[in-house]
C-alpha cells in the first residue's frame, strides 16, 4: 500500500511539472500522456522498489555525489540512495578542516570529522565493518581547496585517527577497508608518494596517465568534461567524440584505474552516454534522479 501511494504521488508530481520525457516528445494528445504515465510509473517503480531488497539499500557502484555537503543531510542523503562515492571540499582554517564550497560559506561545526568521518565510523560499527550490507568500500573524495602541503599535513593527522575505518596504503599494497579516501584539488602528490603508510590515495588527471604513478597511489583519473569534449547532451554525440571517449575509458582501465568527469551537463542523456561507455563514476548533484536511472540500468530496463 505504501509503495502504491508513493507511485501515485510521484505520478501526480510529474504531471504537475508538465514536462515530457524526450522519448514522448514526438507524440501528441492521449499517446503523449500515456507515454508520460508509463515512463513515470516505471521510474517510480524503480525508485521505490529496486533501491531496496528486504529493507536494505542496494549500493549503486558507479554513483558519485558531487559536492555532497550541499545536500540537506550531507552523507546521509547519498547513502539513503545507495551512492558509493561522496565528495567533500575542505579548507584548513585555524587548524580545522572545514567543509564548504567557498571560503565565505564556511560555518562553525561543519568539519570533515563531524559531517563525514564520525558518521561513517558509527555506520560502519553498526554495519559489521562496512557501510552497506555488501562488503564494498565507500569512496570519500576529499577536495583540498587551501594550500596543498599544509592542508594535507593537518588532514594526515586526522585520517590517522580513523585507522579502523580507512583503507590503508603501504607501498603498492592496499588493505581495503570500509572507506577509501581519495585526495583531489590541491594534491601533494610527491609528498604522498614518499609516505611508507598512507590513509588516502590521489585523484589523478588525464595528463597523469603519461607518468609512472602506480594505481595504488593514483587509483582515479578525474577530468573536466569541457576540456576534452564539445558535446553538451543535446542530440547525438559525434562519432569522433564517442570514439575518443571509449578510447580514454579503455586507456584508464588498462592502467588499472577508474574514470570520472566533472563539469558536464547533469542530465539523463549524458548519464546514458557515460554509462554505456563504461565511465566508472557518474558525477551528479541530482541524487534521487541518478538513483532511478542507475537502478533501472542495473535491472536491465
Image: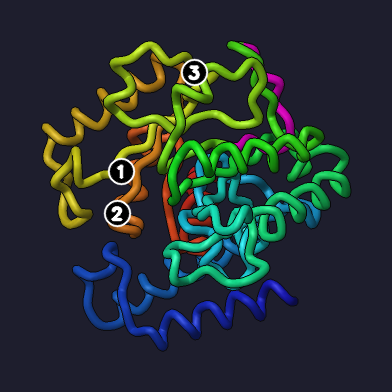
Indicate which disc, 1 or 3, sits on the residue closer to the N terminus. Answer: 3
Apparent side of residue 49 relative to residue 220 in the rendered image (left or right): right
Q: Nearer the viewer's eye, disc 3 or disc 2?
A: 3
Residue 9 position within the rendered picture, expressed as x and y whole percent measured from the top left: 57, 82
Q: Nearer the viewer's eye, disc 1 or disc 3?
A: 3
Is residue 38 in sight in this rendering? no
* Residue at disc 2, secondary structure: helix
Quick one: label 3, few (<14), some, or many (20+) residues within 10 Å? some
Residue nearest the observer in this picture, 273 or 93: 93
Q: Give the quarter of the image for residue 259.
A: top left
Mark 2–mark 1 CB contact (< 8 Å): yes
Residue 130 position within the rendered picture, expressed as x and y whole percent measured from the top left: 78, 39
As measured in the structure, the alpha-carbon distance from the residue carrying label 3 to the one carrying label 2 is 31 Å
Apparent side of residue 50 relative to residue 36 in the rendered image (left or right): right
Residue at which label 1 appears = 273
Residue at which label 3 appears = 215
Q: Give the quarter of the image for residue 212.
A: top left
Residue nearest the observer in this picture, 293 or 192: 192
Quick one: label 1, few (<14), some, or many (20+) residues within 10 Å? some
Is residue 207 in sight in this rendering? yes
Please name the residue shown 30% across and 43% down the image.
273
Q: Give the quarter of the image for residue 73.
A: bottom right
Please name the residue shown 55% across and 62% down the image.
69
Residue at which label 2 appears = 269
* 176 within the magenta span: yes
- Judge whether 263 appears above or below 24 on screen: above
Indicate which disc, 3 or 2, sits on the residue closer to the N terminus. Answer: 3
Quick one: label 2, few (<14), some, or many (20+) residues within 10 Å? some
Residue 1 position within the rendered picture, expressed as x and y whole percent measured from the top left: 74, 76
As measured in the structure, the alpha-carbon distance from the residue carrying label 2 to the one carrying label 1 is 7 Å
Apparent side of residue 236 relative to residue 36 in the rendered image (left or right): left
Amino acid at each position: 500500500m505504501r509503495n502504491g501511494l508513493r507511485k501515485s504521488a510521484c505520478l501526480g508530481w510529474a504531471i504537475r511539472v508538465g514536462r515530457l520525457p524526450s522519448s514522448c516528445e514526438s507524440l501528441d494528445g492521449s499517446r503523449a500522456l500515456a507515454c508520460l504515465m508509463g515512463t513515470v510509473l516505471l521510474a517510480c517503480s524503480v525508485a521505490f522498489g529496486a533501491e531496496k531488497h528486504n529493507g536494505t539499500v542496494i549500493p549503486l557502484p558507479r554513483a558519485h555525489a558531487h559536492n555532497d555537503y550541499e545536500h540537506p543531510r550531507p552523507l546521509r542523503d547519498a547513502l539513503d540512495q545507495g551512492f558509493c562515492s561522496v565528495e567533500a571540499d575542505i579548507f584548513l582554517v585555524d587548524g580545522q578542516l572545514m567543509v564548504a564550497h567557498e571560503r565565505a560559506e564556511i560555518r562553525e561545526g561543519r568539519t570533515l570529522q563531524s559531517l563525514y568521518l564520525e558518521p561513517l565510523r558509527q555506520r560502519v560499527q553498526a554495519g559489521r565493518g562496512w557501510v552497506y550490507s555488501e562488503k564494498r568500500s565507500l569512496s570519500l573524495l576529499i577536495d583540498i581547496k587551501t594550500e596543498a602541503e599544509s592542508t594535507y599535513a593537518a588532514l594526515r593527522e586526522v585520517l590517522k585517527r580513523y585507522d579502523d575505518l580507512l583503507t590503508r596504503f603501504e607501498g603498492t599494497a592496499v588493505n581495503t577497508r570500509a572507506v577509501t579516501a581519495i585526495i583531489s584539488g590541491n594534491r601533494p602528490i610527491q609528498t604522498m608518494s614518499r609516505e611508507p603508510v598512507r590513509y588516502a590515495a590521489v585523484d589523478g588527471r588525464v595528463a597523469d596517465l603519461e607518468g609512472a604513478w602506480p594505481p595504488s597511489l593514483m587509483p582515479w583519473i578525474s577530468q573536466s568534461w569541457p576540456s576534452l569534449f564539445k558535446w553538451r547532451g543535446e542530440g547525438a554525440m559525434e562519432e569522433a567524440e564517442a570514439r575518443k571517449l571509449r578510447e580514454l575509458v579503455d586507456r584508464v582501465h588498462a592502467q588499472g584505474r577508474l574514470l570520472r568527469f566533472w563539469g558536464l551537463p547533469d542530465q539523463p542523456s549524458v548519464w546514458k552516454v557515460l554509462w554505456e561507455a563504461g565511465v566508472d563514476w557518474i558525477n551528479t548533484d541530482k541524487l534521487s534522479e541518478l538513483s532511478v536511472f542507475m537502478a533501472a540500468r542495473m535491472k536491465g530496463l
